[in-house]
Amino acid sequence: MLLTSLPADVLLHICGELFVSDILSLRQTCKLLESIGHERSVWNDALRIHVLCPGFPVPGLHGRPLASLSASELEGLTLRALRFRCNWTSPAPVCSRRVDIFPPTLSLSRARNLLVQFLPGRENRWLLTITLYDQQSAPRRYILQCWDVSVKEPMCVAVMTYWNLVGISVNSDPTNPAVIALSWRGPSKVINTSLYRINFTLDDPESSFIWIRQFPSNRYSIALDDSRLIVSDEDNNVRIINADTGQVQCELLVPLLFDDPTLRNEEHRCLAALIFEQYVLTFCKLWIHLYRIPSKDPSLVELSASDMKPPIPRLDPIAKYKWQWRIDSLVISPHRSHLNQRSAGSDFAPTFPSINILIRFDTWFPWPVNILHHFFLPSNPAFVPAETYASTDVSQLPYLFSSSPTDGPSMANSIPSPVRLFTPSDMVLGQYGTALWIDAQTDPNAPAQAGDHGQRIVGKMLSCPRSKPEHASEGADVDRVSPGFVESRYALDASQLAAAAADAQSPMMVFNLREQDEGWNRVALDEEEGRIAVGSVDGKVTLFEYIPE
């Protein structure tokens, strides 16, 4: 029986079982198969099966529903996504575009890049940079700029000058009008935070940063999630501020050293935090704390007496986990569920996702360790949100849901990453599994050791554990070397072992390197559009793109 004699619905089903390259080859054989190969359903299935289900980013999709796209658009997105994925995960990705962005020049001032970050959402068009200008016998000056990087030559659409800046947080929610929170020190050394939105369409960049409101705050700005600003101070307690009202919603307490509130325990200093509904995870120098915040914001409670203020809840952690070693630097990212992308290619994610953690541990030396550790914090699959919470039942927690260390973070990858004393380094995690960092150029004779000079931009696709780690009993077999529990090989079958081995052998991606200069100090990542932005100690920002033309 000839293939062309089969009914059209059977041919469409066959195309759904083929690789994309086979579909392209098949439609070159005859006019009938060429017509079938251009059907919208063929490329709708191809995009879902070969791109969305494996969890690959789709450059150019920009959150549009697949139902609104034509057959040619679906085909173009599929081919572009697969070519990009092939280039992105290769040992030496090929850069298709490179452009330098230079900061304004101020006389008698030294420029240094303080922040480089892509604004989430908004079609992945905007890059935010903050440049510090240090001038002798003059206050430090900070220039904030927002760039449109979707055009051939990046264009500055917003610029603002600031003084006495002590904290910066970019809003993780692109739907909230407040784009950035800037914490600054006033004349009386009181810390205040100002919220700004950006009008991306104004012709005058100096008028595009628009002030929204200002309120008292703390020195360390940790995160801005929608209308909740997470801050901390020298006491290491974390405070959640309602950015709409400027009132403190709650205070997250940390254990005191010898029950003395005057002693500041550095191991409880918060480095990052995540909020999921009524739960907050704080990631500290030596601890992970889980808190449950009140369902009602006390700043919004109506009181009978207008001069009274509602009491601020002071909350103790309901669960905690302690690392074996102190942390030098840490980045976190909720794990994007690949299965949940099948429905519409949307940004839907579970309410309590598992969390990727990338850590560089500290040492007793003036430099951190030459290894990056990837940990995976699982969520509780049996957790059901409820109005009430029983403090004695840890199984009701979304994270750290038992006293067993195996329900804490498990180590998934250990990555060599050499650093040198005084050489800048930085790292970032993408929601599609890319870990990206700046470290020292390696020694040609010892790839795991730092060379005498030079820097590189390196990445690796992270894999998550495929099974729950097993807890070894106390004895000779207990792992006392690893910084956390590792995935047990005895819990995997043969196919899972093969997949785990493939993940462990996945190549590191060297995106760029410099043999002599050591000026890179900040890195930003846009996985969806294949962009990397790197800041320098002289204020210059370099933009790299890796989507094949």
Image (cartoon, helix red, strand yellow):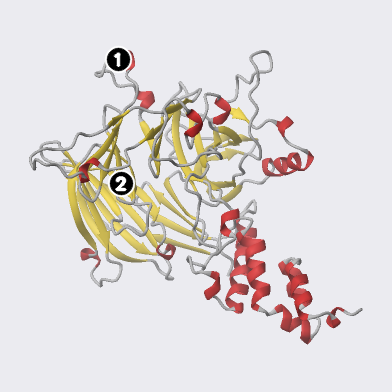
Going by the numbered disc 1, the residue's amino acid type is Asp
Q: Is residue 130 left or right of residue 301?
A: right
Q: First in sequence: mark 2 or mark 1?
A: 2
The answer to which of 317 and 544 lies nearer the viewer is 317
User: Given the image, on which type of amino acid does mark 2 rest?
Assistant: Arg
Instruction: Tell me the quarter of the image containing the N terminus.
Output: bottom right
* 431 sits left or right of 387 in the view: right
Looking at the picture, does residue 437 appear above or below residue 284?
A: below
Provide the residue designation for mark 2: 228
The local secondary structure at tag 1 comes to helix
* Callout 2 crowding tier (Cα within 10 Å): few <14, some 14–19, many ≥20: some
Question: How many numbered discs?
Answer: 2
- Quadrant housing the C terminus: bottom right
- Say which of 394 and 435 sits in front: 394
Residue 516 in view in this figure: no
Q: Is residue 516 above or below residue 72?
A: above
Residue at image point 45% right, 42% down: 385
**67 and 129: which is toward the camera:** 67
Please give the name of the residue rendered at 59% of the width and 36% of the height, measured from the top-left corner: 416
- Residue 510 visible: yes
Residue 351 spot, x, y in % from top left:
47, 48
Image position of 66 (left or right of 150): right
Distance, label 2 to label 1, CA atoms, is 30 Å
- Residue placed at 20% from the left, 44% from the top? 301
How far across and how far down the image is residue 350, in percent? 50, 49
Residue at which label 1 appears: 259
